[in-house]
Image: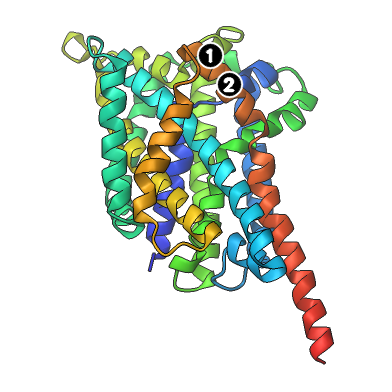
Amino acid sequence: MLTNKQLSSIIINAIVVKMLVTFPRNIFVYCANASWLTAVYVTAIAFGLFIVIQKLYPSKENVIALADRIGGRGIRIITGIAVFAVLALNFVSIVRVFPAVIRLVLLQKTYVEIIGTIFVLVVIFGASCGIEAIARVQQLFLPVAGVVFGAFLLMLIPDMNFGYLMPVFGNGVKSILVDGLSALSVFADLLILNILLPRIKDSDTYKKSGRKAILFGGACAVLIFFFYGACYSYPASTEFIVPVYQLERLINLSDFFSRLEALFQFIWSISIFLYSALYGAVLAEVWRDTFGLRHSKPLIAPIVIGLVGIAVIPESLNDLLHFEGIINRWLYIPAFIIPLIIGVIYKLFHVKQSEKSE
């Protein structure tokens, strides 16, 4: 069974990893350097949506189990495939972007295919260890990553120019309230919390860990947006392929510590491996529950390898980031709508059943 701290660690790491690797730079196109306000806005929305959704799931049954109760095997399969597709799309961009970034920062002379192969093998091994093992490691590693993240932000302070954050509302309030909604994709990983419901002790653990993860993950997102906007003026802030890497390159303590981005990238890499291993295990469980299979572990390798095959379809990193930008613009909708719709239908179904029994 997963504890409150373990579950919180999983989702906090997932949200922050999305910010570090697949940074939603399109938000700066829409909202300019007021994107940090957008992060505050979408965090509040994600928190509100989670409060509503968690009230619809008082038991330890996740969205796939409730779909089975509502409409049997057919609805369960449709729901399970939809959930699998959302999680797979959320994972695919990490699979391709990460090896390319590692080659750019740490291993310039190594073929990206070699880095990608090692990455896949490590992810398969980690996912095969099980969700509980991954959660325990994440719980131990998160404080270390938190200290490094705090140091990373502190070292950026000398490069900040608060004038870059003006005007306060960037391209306008409408751009924040409407176009900024796509930043909700940062919180698409909350769907994993729902999938892991059968692995927790009680519904209170689900509620507490979800709220904590949104607040901590949202705070990290606000800080990254704020520091990036204060370090790079608009429209230059819209031009970098990997924005967080550009922030890392600003840090230069002395001639002896001129490549600190390699150190930061090493720590981020561990977070990404844990994130990816979790996704491999969760996707295998979703597939197992969807089709009523007995075991999930034999599914891990085919699923991870299959998603890697999809990820390498874009020929260049620029093409991938363009594709990833399209995904992020719409991914948050099914990530929140699927558990919401199934939960509401189940509540109505449950009330109707209760009235019939009376």
Q: Position of residue 234 (x, y in %)?
A: 60, 10
Instruction: Tell me which amino acid carries mark 2.
Output: Phe
Q: Is 53 on the left or on the right of 320, as rendered?
A: right
* Residue at disc 1, secondary structure: helix
Q: Nearer the viewer, residue 286 or 278?
A: 286
Identify the residue at horizontal 39%, vertical 18% (top origin): 245
Residue ID for mark 2: 323
Coordinates of residue 86 in the picture (x, y in percent): 58, 42
Q: Residue at x 53, y 45 (%)?
A: 189
Crowd band around label 2 with a 10 angstrom C-alpha radius: few (<14), some (14–19), many (20+): few
Q: Are marks 2 and 1 in contact (CB under 8 Å)?
A: yes
Residue 65, given in percent of the width and then of the height, sits at 59, 66
- Residue 319: numbered disc: 1
Please give left or right for residue 232 compared with residue 54 in the image: left
Residue 188 visible in the shown view: no
| Display colour scheme | rainbow
Q: Whole-Å distance between the Cαs marked 2 and 1?
A: 6 Å
Amino acid type at mark 1: Asp
Label 2: which secondary element: helix
Residue ID at (45%, 34%): 307
Q: Nearer the viewer, residue 37 or 85?
A: 85
**Spot occupied by residue 5 in the image (x, y as percentages of width and height):** 39, 60
